Amino acid sequence: MSSIRVNPDGLSVLDRPNSYIGKTVPRPNLDRLLQGRGLYVSDIELPRMAHVVFLRSPHAHAKIVSVDAVTAKEMPGVIAVVTGKELGAVITPWVGVLSHLKGLKSAPQSAIAVDRVCWQGEAVAAIVATSRAAAEDAAEHVAVAYQELEAVTDMRTALDPATPVIHASLGDNLAFERVHDAGAVDQAFAVSDAVVEADFIFGRHTGVTLEPRAVVADWNAAEARLTIYQGTQAPHMVQNIAALHLGLREAQVRVVCKDVGGSFGIKVHIYADEMATYALSKLLRRPIKFVADRVESFNTDIHARDHRCKGKIGVKRDGTITAFEIDDLTGIGPYSMYPRTSAIEANQVVNLVGGPYTSKNYRARARVVFQNKNVMCQYRAVGHPIACSVTEGLVDLAARKIGMDPLEIRRRNLIADDAYPCASPSGLRFEQLSHHASLDKIVAMMGYDALRAEQATLRKEGIHRGIGIASFIEVTNPSAAFYGVGGAKISSQDGVAVRLDAQGSVICQTSITEQGQGSESLTAQIVGSVLGVSMDRVRVILGDTDVTPYGGGTWASRGAGIGGEAALQATKILRKNILDVAAVILQSTPAELDIVNNAIVNVSDGASRIELNELARIVYFRPDTLPPGIQPELMATKHFVPREYPFAFTNGVQAAWVEVDTETGFVKLLRHWVVEDCGTIINPQLVDEQIRGGVVQGLGAALFEKCIYDERGQLTNANMADYLVPMSGEMPDIDIGHVVSPTRESELGAKGAGEAGTAGAAAAVTNAVNDALSPFGTIITEIPLTPQVILTALGKI
Amino acid sequence: MTAAAAISLTVNGERVEAHVLPRLNLADFLREHLKLTGTHVGCEHGVCGACTVRVGGEIVRSCLMLAVQADGAVVETIEGLSDSGEIADLQAAFRDRNALQCGFCTPGMLMAAQDLLRENRTPAREEIREHLSGNYCRCTGYHAIIDAVETTARARMELKA
């Protein structure tokens, strides 16, 4: 399982001398961030730059009767007040659909609302001024007359005939529906010894990136070129969309992404206010800066996970799971987001439920409905926490029904580690997973039997502790199957260019992006290892569409697996080119030479022959000393996209150990464990920290985070005092273990690790809480597990 | 609008004279007037801790303090603590432990951690968690940050011994 195969061409990329692969090394350039000397978009200032503030609708659904900006335009510092209709002169509307999500529909959305607002927080006017404060002052003097319309807020009644249709042209409020039926579900339930059902409820929550969304758009009319500084995960996607809707060629748009203050999927989309900022720059012919404030962030950053899912599981007395069935409903706000759409999460839920298990009988329906709330879209671990909570919640319920230990039912039903390749009943193809090895490992790490004994002892003292287990699968390394096949211009391939500079250092340009995951580090580790140079000699450049190769960026756990492989392949070519010229200089052959520790050495005895800086000096400045006809090529570029599997699935298991105070309803997280299999590990520390951070995002969803809307569509807790996020005081230490099953799709063998933590954390905690509360005969299938939810379940309030 | 007020203060050891509107908060003054962009603005209502700076030796949320209130004060920001070398060991521990990802919370987190280490030379993990519980980090899950602060505390004690 943990063996790493030998590379076919003999270049032992992963175990060369001084290899950085599999080693914990500090990320390059962290001192910049540690000293407060980074450059986030909110720090950027340009000559003639103006600031935009958006006046936003206080209503969830209303007709815009009039916008009166006369007074505002005369306020000090005000440059312009622009309505949606006026901005329409420079930017076209969009519709967030993808053709492979059959039947998905949405309505045209404008950068600033025209005639009608569809959620509380939708922009109705842009106020541009010399400072943000001046723009905010003026915004208070823009008078908008609204005629309030009935708001559709409850997803459960959104499809009722009596409910108003939000977009009349669409006919109803159904954005998307998917039905899947595999095997013989009814027959399987009929022959089961027990069938258990439950309704799972997931709170609508959001990403709360510490740096809000921010854009500086700089239209240079003299160059006819737009430069967009934006904290984005996908610069080339932004380039494509901005060009498309502003009537420009992509070559006229440059997207620059410097430091990004957190993204997690929040910053992989393109928002209406960002589009408006690009358009305002073009309209006003000057740089325009938009930085969302925290209230705007809550009202306009995509929300996620607002699902209600009915689940059903059949089980035999021997523990065999016979079938899964789900009926999922989610409300996505008034528009499907652009360009990735808001149907992906529900689609993923259908894909992923039951995924770790052998049962072939699976029926699912997912419905995605419109409502007058903020838009929902893809956020870290898209669909995974829902699918995992439903699946693992049902498995625990089945185990309880037949009186079986939660570990035992999983051992009897998880797909065997030697059963691969295989496919799930929803059609997912698995190359190589390791559910059983992972489960065995986590049981050992947590000391399962000792915890059970401790639980029993403490229970006699009235202390209620519980253990929760959650196995999961994770979608990583997506191919064009995610977006490209549906018509979105979102690249699934990534490119890397590497070159030897004139002093023997390496400059590497990659199309993946950095938001703190360590993209820069893993790229430098791969390039340094494959080439034979030390990491401090490798400079990685990312986040600039003028500079890097074309590619997708960093999202859906694709940076290491796709961008990393491109780096590996490009560096192999550069290495060959260097050895070719070295052989000429040294009157040797490439096969007799290697590059180790920044120098060309003999393969035979390791003796140093020529330093790379000396080789570079000759190539760049004294090519006249090389034999005739030799044209060295010290730059190489390669692109990579997985072709065999649409996604590289990974797997893992999480375990939670919690204590529930049955008087107050508070849950204390005592310890959390994760075992994850992301294939080849490039930097163990970075992988572990991705998982820990992901777990805590999942724990936030499990215990605290919920966007609370009232029946009129008003978000009532749009601030960080009322919307609770995990802070250090409540979070546990998190132990991480690994099983390593490299993918054979690439020489590197790396799969993604960004979603794993978030995928299973809430499921593990919910199962643990239910385990703790088992003496009370209550089952909770709703998150967040607030004291109110727990005390209600206990019948105390 | 109320007229600008004259203020005089010391920021990272340099004397600063300025005219500021009474409504300007200290975070915006540091960032927009002095271009000290290491102090970050996350929530602008005193919850996230990203804007934590030291005023008169005590850590404060610079978004909750007005610039005019800093008249006559000694203000220290992440740039100052970095250049003086006061937290070089703490920064190294954060780097070695990867106790930062996007880095946006990091200046405030370092400010709060150093504040703890000045008060309590041997904090337990729970005490570190408690002291940093006003500083929001969305990336790390906190475990690595707690490790880095704990490591720094131990190293400083060993250095003293």
Image (cartoon, helix red, strand yellow):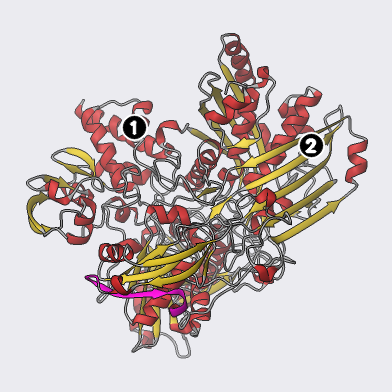
Mark 1 — on which chain does it sit? B
Q: Is residue A658 above or below residue B33?
A: above
Choose between A675 and A537: the one closer to the eye: A675
Q: Amino acid at mark 1?
A: Glu
Mark 2 — on which chain does it sit? A
Q: Is residue A393 above or below residue A77?
A: above
Q: Which residue is mark 1?
A: B150
Please state if B101 lies on the left or on the right of A666 as rendered: left
User: Which quadrant, please, contains the N terminus of chain A?
Assistant: top right
| Residue A166 can be seen, yes or no | yes
Please state if A13 lies on the left or on the right of B147 as rendered: right
The stretch in magenta equals A75-86
Label of residue A661 in the image:
none
Q: Give residue A499's quadrant in the image.
A: bottom left
The alpha-carbon separation of the residues under discs 1 and 2 comes to 42 Å
> Residue B15: percent from the left, percent from the top?
6, 53
Residue A182 lies in the magenta-colored region = no
Label of residue A413 in the image:
2
**Dot 1: within a 10 Å radius of its alpha carbon, few (fewer than 14), some, or many (20 or more) residues?**
many
Please state if A87 lies on the left or on the right of A337 as rendered: left
**Dot 2: within a 10 Å radius of its alpha carbon, few (fewer than 14), some, or many (20 or more) residues?**
some
Q: Give residue A310's quadrant in the image.
A: top right
Choose between B106 and A303: the one closer to the eye: A303
Residue beneath the point at 50% across and 22% down: A664
Q: Is residue A418 above or below residue B16?
A: above
> Residue A55: percent from the left, percent from the top?
39, 64
> Residue A204: percent from the left, percent from the top?
56, 47
Q: Amino acid at mark 2?
A: Asn
Farthest-out residue, top: A460
> Residue A606: percent from the left, percent from the top?
46, 59
Asked if labels 2 and 1 touch by Cβ distance under 8 angstroms, the answer is no
